[in-house]
Each structure stands twice: as C-alpha cells, then as structure tokens.
Image: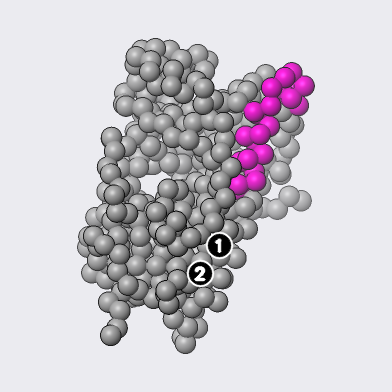
Amino acid sequence: MAQPYDICIRGAGIVGRTLALLLARERLRVGLLAQPPGAASGASDVRAYALNAASKQLLDSLRSWPDARHATAVQAMQVHGDDGGEVNFSAEAQGAPALAWIVDVPALEARLAEAVRYQPLIDVLEAPAPAALTVVCEGRASTTREEFAVDFEITPYPQRAIAARVSCEQPHRQVARQWFSPGEILAFLPLDGPQGNSVAVVWSVLQERTAGLLALEADGFAAQLEAASHQALGRLTLASERAAWPLQLARARHWVGRRGGASWALAGDAAHTVHPLAGQGLNLGLADAAELARVLHEREYWRGVGDEKLLRRYERARKADVLSMGATTDGLQQLFAQPGSPWQALRNWGMKGFERSGPLKTWVARQAMGLPGNGLL
C-alpha cells in the first residue's frame, strides 16, 4: 500500500513550516506534525530573531515575510566591550538595505501558519504518519531525536538567556546594540519599525544571577537593564513578561539515517544550537530547510526522497557552516568569560583592531548578513 505522504515533518515551528512550504512547492505530499506528544503551550512569546538577507529572501519567496511593523530593518549595529573596545557596522557601508531584520516571532509564525493552511499538499497532523522520509524540526529538546537514538553532544554554558520586551525613553533609530561584560552579554534589538522606541532584550547572564533578576519587580529589572546598557536609550519600562532558558553549544553526531525501513533527517535546533550572541540560530535553521529542499529538488530522477546517499549530501553541505558558526560564537563567549585585567585588555585591544581592519570587517559583516563575500584582498 502506498504511503500517503512523501515526507513527514515533526515540528511545526518556523523551520518546520518553512520546510513544508518549500517541499510542497516541489509537488511533494507533506504531513506536518504540529507538535510532539506532550508538548505544552507556554506564556506569551517575547522572542524576536535577527534574520539576514538570505533568510528574508527565502521567506519572501514563500510570501511569509511579516509587514514592516513586525520586521524592523537594522541600519547600524554597535558592539561595546568591557573596557572601551567598540565595533560599529552600518548597512550603508555594506551597500545593503539593512544589516539584518529584527522579526517578531509570533507575527512570523502567524504568516507561515496562514501559508500552510492554504497549501493543499500539506496536511497538519495530530500524530506521526508513515513516510519515505521523516524530518525532525522539534527544536533542541526533540523527543523524536531521542526516539531515533541520535547522539546529541551538549556543552552547557554557565549562563541563561533572559528575553523580554522593553519600551525606551529614546527611539532606537534602527540601531542594534550589544554590550559585552565579563561572563555576560546584553543585546537590544530594535522593534516596531523605523520610528519605534521599543526593543527586544536578549540578556545572557551568569546562572547564579538569573533567579534574582527574574524575581525583581518590573521597575527593578528595568533599572538593572539601564545600568547594563549605560542608559543608551534613556529610561526603560518593562513591557512584557520575562522568559529564560539555559544556553548551550550542541550538535547531533549524525543528521541523517534510517530506522525501521524509512529515512530520517534533522534540521534546525534539533540538529544544532549555538550561543545567541551573534543572532544566527534561526538563520542556520532556515538555511538547513533551504538546503534540504534544494538537494531534494536536484535529485536524480531514479532516487527517492529517502535515499540515504542523497540525504548525505544535505548533511555534508550544512555541517561545515554550522561547525564554523558554532566555533566562532563559542570562541567569543569563552573570550569574554575570562576574568582578570590581562584578558580584558586583550579582548578590547582585539575589538579596536577589528574596528580598523577594513576588508576583514567587511567580509565578516557580509558573512553574517548572508551575502556573498567580497574577498579579503
């Protein structure tokens, strides 16, 4: 008996829905499992993601890009060290319309859900369905990954991320701001369009400080943010609940395989997680979806979608980029986690040198933006 679906995707988050839409565009029948068994909905979602040009182009092609109010273009970025080091980036210097876009997660998920609803080749499922290929997009705590006995190597960081929304006395002027201090990193991501005066906060704090910060009243927490941001945007007002989660560097040893006569593949946080300091986590996951769809589109006519050699092409193509980004974010996290004045002097000397590095700085910026590099010579 023929299987009703070519591909079953477990996990209907941003990566899972994006992949489903890409595969349906290839005329493949897709079953999309809304959430793993036992998953519970949480409080209101305060997350926002920094998406690069490649991610924007991908989501635009699916007609799922949010409107301008929910996707704020970043025109400049300021990165501050803990002893005078500073790095500045601008979209104008890169000849680009934006360095990135800060996208409201609920708005993006709503656009993708609407696109899925109107795609007749996608069925939203309440239970897993048999298929030639199962793609696991359930996130870092994937239960299916455990079910398939995939080794997931985790290196925990001594930090937790705190996310919130904050209203600011001064407008953000489409500038993303980041402050490094020993062991901690604070990011302000501009929201609500060019004239907005609110930001999404992602604050990576030492584990022992997390409970105390979460227990503070709203005014007390805002005061802590004002101090950590050197009042760059004036007085701050907490405008949302606070969410927190542990930080880790993690990757699956194998991204593809076979089980019970059918093939499987991992994508997004089910395959890898990196430190959020570079804002590249979702960009990596969307690149996974784009690459898997490309590999399946370009397959030889005699290969099925579950062909293991075919899936190895996807694994090889994505592992190198993910390993590179993981090493970069881990190196920066480790550098700013080191206490003592010699380390402080070294990292701030490095930031000042990088600010003056010319072609190297341009190359790094374009890589983060998802644009072709101009080379270093």
Which residue type carries mark 2? Gly
What kind of element bears circle 1? loop
- If the image is split into quadrants, where does the N terminus sit? bottom left
Q: Looking at the image, which is closer to me, 1 or 48?
A: 1
Res. 178 in view: no
Nearer to me, 254 or 235: 254
Residue 330 as seen in the image, left or right of residue 297: right
Residue 119 in the image: state x and y as whole percent. 25, 66
Answer yes or no: do the residues labelled 1 and 2 have beta carbons within 8 Å?
yes
Rate crowding at label 2 as few (under 14), some (14 to 19) or many (20 or more) other CA atoms within 10 Å. some
Q: Is residue 274 above or below residue 5?
A: above
Query: Of helix, strand and loop, which mostly describes the magenta segment?
Result: helix
Q: Is residue 200 left or right of residue 361?
A: left
- The correct choice, above or below, for 342 with respect to 34 in the image is above
Residue at 58%, 64% in the rendered image = 317
Using the image as rendered, state which of residue 256 and residue 169 is in the foreground.
256
For the point 37% across and 31% down, the residue is 243
Residue 252 vs residue 78, the one in the foreground = 252
Which residue is labeled 1 in the image?
Answer: 254
State yes or no: residue 317 in magenta.
no
Quick check: is 333 in the magenta stretch? yes
Q: What residue type is labelled 1?
A: His
Identify which residue is drawn at 69% across, 22% down: 339
Q: Give the range drawn in magenta.
A: 325-346
Name the residue beneath numbered marker 2. 257
Q: In which image quadrant can residue 126 be found?
A: bottom left
Q: Is residue 5 left or right of residue 282?
A: left
